[in-house]
């Protein structure tokens, strides 16, 4: 939600957004670094010391004679951390806490080569090396003597050291000349930003050698592959409340993950830039193709392509981690080990969510809930926006509209459904409200630069903002969710953090001024992008504490940072009901997934404006094949519950939601993989087809795990879509018709409004529920079916993960079941996929469908340990080579096999 959402308002024009939000030309530290001149640096090689964490060097900046300290730390998990700080700062510079989850085990370095100009260090087997060059300073990371990444190859290293404030004269002016005084304050419109430490910006370039495709850096409403920024704005990482954001834009949105991933056919690399201040990233591609365009044929020579990435941040230190891969799967694991694994959501959170700003009252909530049952549409969660509170006071209820909130939650809980309420970070200034007084008296609010409580405007009007960077404030806020303190709450109430960029209606760029002061005396500029991350953390800890550490929380946050995946879900904010926003949601979610934030989604149908029925159906079809599945709409839009558009639309939406529920065993298994390996459920094609360059720029279709390829229809009125089926030698099956296709082709697929193009990859096994139920709790009681898609060798394998769906017992008591299905030479085996796991469940396989069986079998036998082989009923459809074995009752937790004769 954003301030501009008022009755009768239209989408803001582009020039309105221009006036509200900065571009790079408005930002002083960006101008300084781009205009230069860039200082040169010399590595003082004789200062090198090999330490237990790697190596350290001093760097000398020419002209100023400033000394910097360089630390290089290779780690056993396949990463190299590079840290540059002042050698002797006048006080400590801000270093981002709480994002990196633990100290990685460092490797011991040794000198491989040394000369007057450079020193080369290696570790472990010597496969990787770091070479530090004296002058001009640069740092290379090599693999088997091939340079992969170079820091400062373009000489853009920039480090503004902390200074004492200018001394005022008797007339109130500054003694320093006008050429420096402006560095201590900056204006944007009528806002004045006073910099307590003066200019403190940092920056550096990194070159990726041999790469022409880079990804990541969410959140931007842009394509998956990052664009060359020479033709316009850099990518900006600065969390902002941008209503109806401009599309194909590099301006900052609600969250920031400063992770950039480079990929080429034989290698995947990443750079994580750990900085929470305002950050810009320029991307410059150069390749032999560019040279060929501009060079006469006789003078052309092969030039290795490379991508130059220039990072610029307002403050902090240079702290970057190079992730060495070399595969996408290894890189995802390295990043998860660094910043944390995706939280395993409770099963209900992967179901369908129904939200609106706002459901009017308790009767409205019950009527919507009954509507889903009446129309046979499954759902799990209904949501309440800000109007459910008493005058926008969070942790309260409007006593006229929601007089018995606990009874409402119990009513939903009897149907195994949940309620989610909103909790924003601003607190209404109200001396008569005990919660406000408690926060004020406890010192839990952000202060202005004069040391008084900072006031800004948001939904309640005059508001103060909680300082979530303080551990004490986070603990206080977490306690606010206890059942005895949060009156009207029950254990089935979950939470939605909105407006936590933070959004301040009367602030610069509609956010908090950079010179307000947080816990520890740090200015807001240092940690701006962490604000929502910290609220998300505190809310999750509140729900975990509420359950005594037994139950998994569910919390959705609009703002996020690296590591937010540990806490739950995010979404793409205030989108618009248009085909363009539907289309952009796919690369936006893929970028989030590449950057570790795997539990992500976009508001179905568009938050603002009214979708026509075709757009609404297509959006449901797309969102049902994405991780977080929620419909949400603004109070100025028409109601859009799924049954309000006629039976044809209702039937189409019912079908895709039911299909989503049937596929939840597969989704849940994928989230277990994300939780344990860092591999995201939603994957760009290149993650699975690493050597196929035709996949590197595809962002209108994607893989769901390794088994399913989805290509949602995102154009109106189309009768045919083009689908790339990658992998020469691969086999693909249409999940609806079982029709088989060869890989390595682009397929022209006829479509109707009911068509959802999804293909299962040969060689995979996908587990589904045999029905959808009315919610996930019912789903858990239903039998399962598995679909085995044979590859060209007649083989396939896959996994199924099961646990109780809600508690931490899977973690604490190893109460889970992880099974592997393996098909080879006509035998399908069900076996344990790991030695751990003690979850004894009654889940049973009811049917098995095998795709790619050309000839009708003579018999199908089922073998159980300790029992005689039994014949199974089967049906073979020759036209699509499909074998269906039915009327089974095979417990998932038992070993068994099926033999096709």
Image: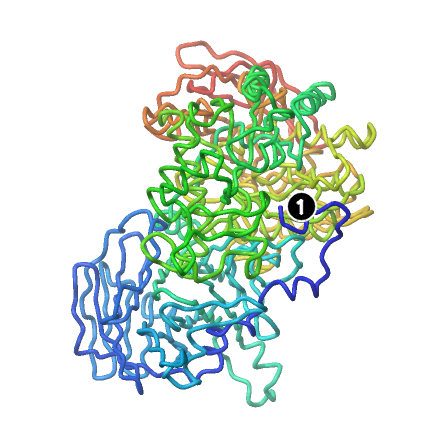
Residue 595 position within the rendered picture, expressed as x and y whole percent measured from the top left? 48, 52
Q: Residues within 10 Å of mark 1 (few under 14, many from 20)?
A: many
**Residue furthest front in the image:** 170
651 sits to left or right of 660: right
895 sits to left or right of 578: left
519 sits to left or right of 60: right
In front: 702, or 427?
427
Query: Secondary structure beneath disc 1?
Result: loop
Q: Residue at x 67, y 41 (%)?
A: 622
Residue 586 position within the rendered picture, expressed as x and y whole percent measured from the top left? 62, 49
In front: 729, or 588?
588
Residue 270, above or below 861 = below
In front: 679, or 125?
679
Q: Residue at x 38, y 49 (%)?
A: 469
Residue 577 position within the rendered picture, expressed as x and y whole percent measured from the top left? 73, 47
In front: 156, or 848?
156
The residue where tag 1 is placed is: 711
């Amino acid at each position: 939600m954003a301030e501009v959402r008022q009755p009768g308002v239209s989408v803001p024009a582009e020039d309105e957004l221009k006036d509200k939000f900065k571009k790079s030309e408005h930002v002083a530290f960006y101008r300084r670094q781009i205009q230069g001149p860039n200082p040169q640096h010399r590595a003082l090689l004789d200062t090198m010391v090999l330490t237990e964490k790697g190596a350290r060097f001093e760097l000398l900046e020419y002209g100023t004679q400033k000394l910097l300290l360089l630390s290089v730390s290779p780690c056993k998990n396949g990463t190299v951390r590079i840290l540059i700080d002042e050698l002797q700062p006048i006080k400590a510079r801000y270093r981002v806490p709480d994002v990196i989850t633990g100290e990685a085990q460092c490797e011991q370095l040794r000198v491989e080569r040394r000369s007057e100009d450079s020193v080369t260090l290696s570790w472990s087997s010597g496969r990787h090396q770091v070479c530090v060059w004296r002058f001009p300073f640069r740092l290379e990371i090599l693999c088997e003597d091939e340079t992969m990444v170079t820091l400062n190859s373009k000489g853009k290293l920039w480090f503004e050291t902390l200074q004492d404030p200018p001394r005022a004269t008797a007339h109130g002016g500054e003694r320093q000349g006008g050429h420096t005084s402006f560095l201590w304050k900056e204006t944007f419109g009528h806002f004045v930003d006073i910099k307590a430490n003066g200019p403190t910006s940092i920056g550096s370039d990194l070159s990726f050698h041999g790469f022409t495709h880079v990804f990541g850096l969410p959140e931007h409403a842009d394509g998956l592959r990052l664009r060359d920024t020479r033709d316009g704005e850099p990518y900006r990482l600065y969390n902002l409340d941008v209503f109806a954001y401009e599309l194909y834009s590099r301006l900052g949105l609600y969250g920031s993950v400063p992770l950039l991933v480079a990929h080429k056919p034989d290698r995947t690399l990443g750079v994580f830039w750990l900085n929470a201040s305002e950050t810009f990233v320029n991307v410059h591609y150069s390749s032999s193709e560019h040279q060929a365009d501009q060079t006469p044929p006789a003078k052309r020579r092969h030039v290795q392509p490379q991508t130059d990435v220039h990072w610029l941040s307002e403050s902090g230190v240079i702290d970057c981690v190079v992730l060495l891969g070399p595969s996408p799967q290894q890189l995802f694991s390295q990043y998860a080990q660094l910043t944390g694994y995706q939280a395993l959501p409770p099963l209900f959170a992967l179901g369908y969510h129904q939200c609106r700003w706002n459901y009017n009252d308790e009767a409205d909530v019950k009527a919507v809930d009954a509507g889903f049952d009446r129309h046979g549409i499954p759902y799990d969660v209904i949501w309440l926006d800000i109007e459910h509170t008493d005058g926008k006071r969070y942790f309260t209820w409007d006593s006229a509209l929601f007089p018995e909130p606990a009874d409402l939650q119990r009513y939903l809980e009897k149907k195994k459904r949940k309620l989610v309420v909103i909790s924003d970070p601003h607190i209404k200034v109200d001396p008569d409200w005990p919660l406000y007084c408690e926060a004020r008296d406890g010192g839990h609010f952000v202060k202005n630069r004069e040391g008084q409580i900072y006031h800004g405007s948001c939904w309640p009007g005059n508001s103060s903002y909680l300082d979530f960077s303080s551990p004490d404030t986070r603990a206080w806020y977490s306690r606010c969710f206890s059942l005895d303190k949060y009156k009207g709450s029950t254990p089935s109430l979950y939470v939605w953090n909105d407006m936590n960029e933070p959004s301040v209606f009367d602030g610069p760029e509609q956010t908090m001024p950079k010179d307000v002061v947080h816990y520890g005396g740090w200015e807001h500029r240092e940690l701006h992008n962490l604000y929502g991350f910290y609220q998300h953390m505190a809310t999750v800890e509140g729900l975990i504490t509420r359950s005594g550490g037994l139950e998994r929380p569910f919390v959705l946050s609009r703002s996020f940072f690296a590591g937010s995946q540990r806490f739950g879900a995010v979404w793409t904010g205030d989108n618009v009901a248009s085909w363009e926003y539907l289309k952009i949601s796919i690369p936006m979610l893929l970028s989030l997934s590449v950057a570790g934030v795997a539990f992500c989604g976009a508001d179905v149908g568009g938050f603002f404006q009214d979708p026509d029925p075709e757009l609404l159906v297509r959006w449901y079809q797309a969102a049902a094949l994405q991780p977080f599945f929620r419909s949400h709409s603004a109070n100025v839009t028409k109601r859009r519950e799924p049954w309000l558009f006629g039976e044809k639309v209702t039937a189409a939406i019912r079908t895709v939601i039911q299909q989503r529920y049937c596929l939840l065993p597969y989704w849940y298994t994928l989230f277990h993989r994300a939780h344990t390996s860092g591999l995201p459920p939603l994957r760009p094609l290149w993650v699975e087809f690493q050597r196929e360059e035709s996949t590197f720029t595809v962002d209108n279709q994607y893989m769901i795990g390794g088994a399913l390829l989805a290509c949602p229809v995102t154009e109106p009125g189309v009768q045919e879509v083009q689908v790339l089926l990658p992998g020469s030698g691969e086999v693909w099956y249409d999940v609806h018709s079982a029709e088989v296709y060869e890989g390595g082709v682009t397929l022209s697929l006829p479509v109707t409004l009911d068509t959802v193009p999804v293909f299962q990859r040969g060689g995979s096994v996908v587990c589904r529920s045999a029905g959808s139920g009315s919610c996930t709790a019912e789903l858990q009681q239903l039998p399962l079916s598995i679909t085995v898609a044979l590859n060209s060798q007649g083989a396939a394998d896959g996994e199924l993960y099961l646990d109780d769906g809600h508690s931490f017992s899977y973690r604490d008591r190893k109460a889970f079941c992880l099974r592997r299905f393996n098909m080879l030479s006509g035998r399908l085996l069900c076996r344990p996929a790991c030695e751990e796991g003690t979850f004894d469940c009654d889940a049973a396989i009811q049917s098995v469908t095998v795709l790619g069986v050309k000839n009708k079998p003579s018999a199908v036998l089922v073998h159980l340990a300790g029992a005689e082989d039994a014949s199974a009923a089967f049906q073979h459809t020759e036209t699509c080579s499909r074998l269906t074995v039915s009327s089974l009752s095979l417990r998932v937790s038992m070993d068994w096999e099926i033999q096709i004769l």
